[in-house]
Image (cartoon, rainbow, N blue to C red):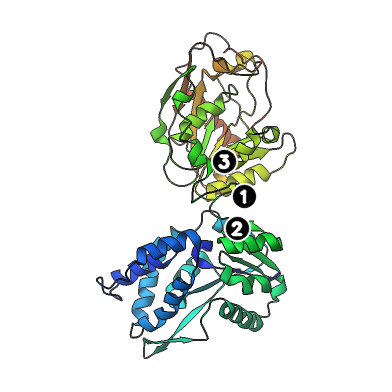
């Protein structure tokens, strides 16, 4: 099946590991608090943005000498203490990508210039099968200031990988390698499946010329980013209630949405304007939010490009494909927010005021698969802004739009249908303020599903 070689800094992690490791070494008394490399902060920032450079590599080579006399036991303790800070730097989509390789039967190998003793605890925590890293020579429990087995960088990294592969019987032509750095070109060129992951400018150009896949583990496939900002981050600055002067928003309960970790937002479906109302809520969260939408919308230029750019998840109507739920599950495991409309269709006439809402099981299945909390949202008034049979929203006059966010729903059953009934009942409870005397405008006809 082959092995998977994964670089550490700016590949597995969103940035350099150095600051977290330096902090742990100081806290554990390995390095005096007053001993700091001048300009280290600026160097790490430059490395985080543009990748490895000859200055950073020169310092990495010199680190072995500087470590001469350190206690191996103290360094190992510092490395253990650094694990929580390093885990916080793991790229959000990295665990899912690694798990896919693990399921395929491939061995995971962390391959890094970082000293072995400093990174082995993180590799063990993440479930790597092996670590190929720079080894500091040890005598009587202390580092001598020398390196054993060569410096694991550039051609030296390839030599170390070849030694490991020969020892365990792996064929490099069947292996994968992920790296951000042009200096890992020897290793990338030696494996059968090279991946330029968050590549520096030079590796990006080489990957394009060689037709290697260019990937990112900090965001969904197809979502661009400039200096760490996605189109979503820019769009949320524009999505404010003031952007819809024909709608008067009454939004309550946004504080019920957890600020960290994967979250499912499940809302009832009244109108095309539901997406705008939910976008106003999403803009208040200051975190990536992914929407499920029917695939036909992705084919409409330029709206379709925008949907793709913000990480929208296309749904093939009637196909029965699990791909949308798999993409949503990946986003939730990456700690993002996913919006889903369980009803799937805008209800007909009086069905909009039915005492019991009916929904599909997608949200419940996602919650069961990921453990993400499900937050119910009740919407009404959107159908008066944009009726089902209208080609555009009503831009004349003022239309009241109500959004009520409830606390996370406890889904305790193992049956997805039963959990869906509990969720829909929770959404229905949020609609009790709505006048129930007549069918809502624009709800006379059904529309196509936006959620699985």
Observer-side mark, 2 or 3, equals 3
State the quadrant of the C terminus: top right
Q: Which residue is mark 1?
A: 221
Residue 256 as seen in the image, left or right of residue 362: left
Residue 278 as seen in the image, left or right of residue 158: left
Counting residues from the start of the chain, the first of labels 3 and 1 encountered is 1
Counting residues from the start of the chain, the first of labels 2 and 3 encountered is 2
Q: How many numbered marks have been drawn onto this rendered protein structure?
A: 3
Residue lying farthest right? 319
Q: CA distance from mark 3 to mark 1?
A: 10 Å
The answer to whether 27 is drawn above or below residue 243 in the figure is: below
Q: Which residue is mark 2?
A: 97
Residue lying farthest top? 437
Residue 159 as seen in the image, left or right of residue 65: right
Q: Which residue is mark 3?
A: 310
The residue drawn where x is 58% and y is 11% is: 439
Residue lying farthest left? 34
Image coordinates for residue 161, horizontal then vertical, percent: 60, 78
């Amino acid at each position: 099946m082959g092995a998977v070689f994964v670089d550490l800094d700016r590949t597995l992690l969103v940035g350099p590991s150095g600051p977290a490791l330096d902090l742990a070494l100081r806290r554990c008394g390995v390095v005096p608090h007053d001993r700091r490399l001048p300009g280290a902060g600026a160097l790490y920032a430059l490395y985080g943005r543009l990748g490895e450079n000859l200055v950073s590599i020169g310092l990495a080579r010199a680190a072995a000498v500087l470590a001469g006399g350190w206690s191996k036991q103290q360094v190992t303790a510092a490395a253990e203490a650094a694990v929580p800070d390093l885990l916080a730097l793991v790229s959000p989509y990295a665990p899912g990508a690694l798990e896919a390789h693990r399921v395929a039967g491939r061995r995971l190998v962390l391959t890094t210039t970082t000293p072995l003793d400093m990174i082995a605890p993180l590799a063990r925590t993440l479930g790597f099968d092996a670590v190929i890293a720079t080894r500091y020579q040890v005598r009587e429990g202390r580092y001598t200031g020398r390196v054993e087995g060569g410096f694991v960088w550039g051609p030296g990294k390839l030599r170390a990988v070849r030694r490991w592969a020969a020892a365990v019987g792996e064929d490099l032509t069947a292996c994968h390698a992920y790296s951000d750095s042009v200096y890992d070109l020897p290793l990338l060129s030696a494996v059968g499946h090279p991946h330029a992951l968050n590549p520096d400018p030079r590796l990006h150009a080489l990957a394009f010329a060689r037709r290697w896949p260019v990937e990112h583990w900090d965001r969904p496939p197809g979502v661009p980013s400039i200096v760490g900002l996605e189109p979503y981050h820019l769009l949320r600055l524009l999505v404010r209630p003031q952007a819809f002067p024909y709608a008067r928003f009454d939004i309550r309960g946004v504080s019920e949405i957890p600020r960290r970790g994967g979250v499912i937002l499940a809302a009832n479906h009244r109108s095309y304007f539901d997406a705008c109302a939910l976008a106003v809520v999403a803009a208040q969260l200051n975190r990536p939010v992914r929407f499920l939408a029917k695939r036909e919308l992705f084919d409409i230029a330029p709206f379709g490009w925008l949907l793709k750019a913000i990480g929208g998840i296309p749904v093939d109507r009637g196909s029965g494909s699990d791909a949308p739920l798999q993409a949503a599950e990946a986003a939730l495991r990456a700690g993002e927010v996913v919006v889903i409309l369980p009803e799937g269709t805008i209800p007909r006439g009086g069905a909009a005021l039915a005492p019991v809402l009916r929904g599909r099981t997608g949200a419940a299945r996602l919650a069961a698969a990921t453990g993400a909390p499900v937050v119910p949202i009740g919407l009404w008034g959107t159908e008066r802004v944009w009726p089902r049979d209208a080609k555009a929203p009503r831009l004349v006059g003022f239309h009241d739009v109500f959004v009520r966010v409830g606390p996370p729903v406890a889904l305790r059953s193992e049956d997805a249908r039963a959990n869906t009934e509990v969720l829909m009942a929770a959404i229905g409870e949020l609609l009790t303020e709505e006048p129930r005397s007549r069918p809502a405008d624009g709800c006379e006809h059904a529309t196509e599903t936006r959620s699985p």
